[in-house]
Image (cartoon, coloured by chain):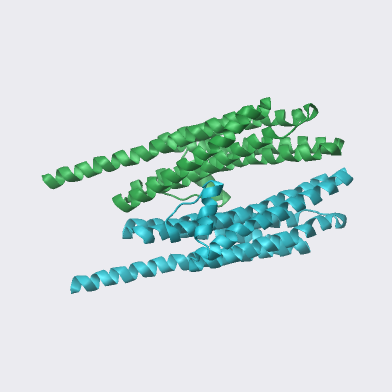
Chain colours: A green, B cyan
Amino acid sequence: MDTLNLNKHISAQFNAELEHIRTQVMIMGGLVEQQLTDAITALHNMDSELARRVIADDQKVNRMEVEIDEHCVKIIAKRQPTASDLRLVMAITKTISELERIGDVAEKISRTALEKFSQQHQPLLISLESFGQHSVEMLHEVLDAFARMDLEAAIEIYQADKKLDQEYEGIIRQLMTYMMEDPRTIPNVLTALFCARSIERIGDRCQNICEIIFYFVKGQDVRHLDGDKLDQFLTNNTN
Amino acid sequence: MDTLNLNKHISAQFNAELEHIRTQVMIMGGLVEQQLTDAITALHNMDSELARRVIADDQKVNRMEVEIDEHCVKIIAKRQPTASDLRLVMAITKTISELERIGDVAEKISRTALEKFSQQHQPLLISLESFGQHSVEMLHEVLDAFARMDLEAAIEIYQADKKLDQEYEGIIRQLMTYMMEDPRTIPNVLTALFCARSIERIGDRCQNICEIIFYFVKGQDVRHLDGDKLDQFLTNNTN
């Protein structure tokens, strides 16, 4: 009986630990989402104070990654999880790495907001605003799907990345016309262009988090599946 | 005595498994290095056959990542490693993710080699060749350091990334002059420019692998340390 109680206790304690790191991931996700939102606002309003705050707060995101990672390694060493518990821990270590990189994009966008854009060149950045907003929405949705480990939502988000890619292509074309019309704009346009590329990469990182959700829920690693097999996976798991 | 033998056997078996995934990482690293070398050659010679081979072989790199990752999870579940064994397994899962992304860069460079560059624009790509070569050298050295888990070599490589960054800045400046002189070159120059940026990111990924070596050897996660603390770490561990 004692042993049973002890086991129960250990298990409850273990559950609490797993719950704790899951919560930490959600807090980290919330922080990254805020950072990205603020970065885009800073870019739109050329708000250098807000941009500087985002850059300074990137350290918080980084620290959270290291702390959660340490926590995961401790749980593996101490609790020796198997099956879905182990999948959860592995899913978390991979997710926080993606979140940290999205945090880096927020920092990069903020650095763009600090550059000296003349009044005449600000329209370049405005075209990035709605694009940036769409990346924030995608991040918000994927964090929500992660919190609920919602396979169907993850599939939907995964497929929606195409739209972000198309938007990106449009922005690149638009930015190129500025450069061609007036070569003096080239350095500024390049800054905007690298910024656009970073935002487009957020979509890819969100797709990676979707794949992590697939892995956790289905126990299947779909990374790098060829097009047909991936389509089959996506179709089979959609109602 | 039986138990002892059994333990020994289990341990020897476990060692063999760890050795096996380490070897797999080195094979994957070798393949990625070859892919990168071929991609740069294909770009330099505008060799579309070689470029297509690199693109096709990226699937091999991807498959290796998934296989090694599965292997790591199995080892954790079955062997419940702790201390330096666990650090090694975690180090491997992170390293293969970096290698896979370097493989993606090789694929991207090869796609650039397939684009239609007119004879007149080929000098754009030539400027990328020595830059690309330097990134291959960095990758080669970091794989070597990883194989030996050589802390000092990793520190040296980590610090050498500065040179790659400076080279990148120079290339960007050079490419901008082409665009300014003749706006018709803009689309081609942008392709070269994105290619340069991908190569520069290889340096960052090699730095990440150095950090993984630091983590394995010293048990300390130095990611995101602020400049002073990082310098202190690097100095304290250099003879």
Nearer to the camera, A78 or B232? B232
Q: Residue at x 52, y 35 (%)?
A: A32
Residue B96 visible within the image = no
Q: Residue at x 32, y 57 (%)?
A: B80
Above or below, A222 against A158 in this view is below
Q: Give the image location of residue A161, x and y in percent.
A: 59, 38
Q: Is A181 on the left-hand or right-hand side of A137? A: right
Q: Is B200 on the left-hand or right-hand side of B231? A: right
Q: Give the quadrant of the N terminus of chain A.
A: top left
Q: Residue at x 65, y 63 (%)?
A: B136
- The residue most toward the top is A45
Q: Give the image location of residue B112, x and y in percent.
A: 73, 54
Above or below, B137 against A213 in this view is below
Q: Residue at x 19, y 45 (%)?
A: A7
Q: Quadrant of residue B5?
A: bottom left
Residue B232 visible within the image = yes
Q: How many marks?
A: 0
Q: Give the image location of residue A126, x and y in percent.
A: 71, 28
Q: Quadrant of residue A166?
A: top right
Q: Give the image location of residue A213, x and y in percent.
A: 45, 42
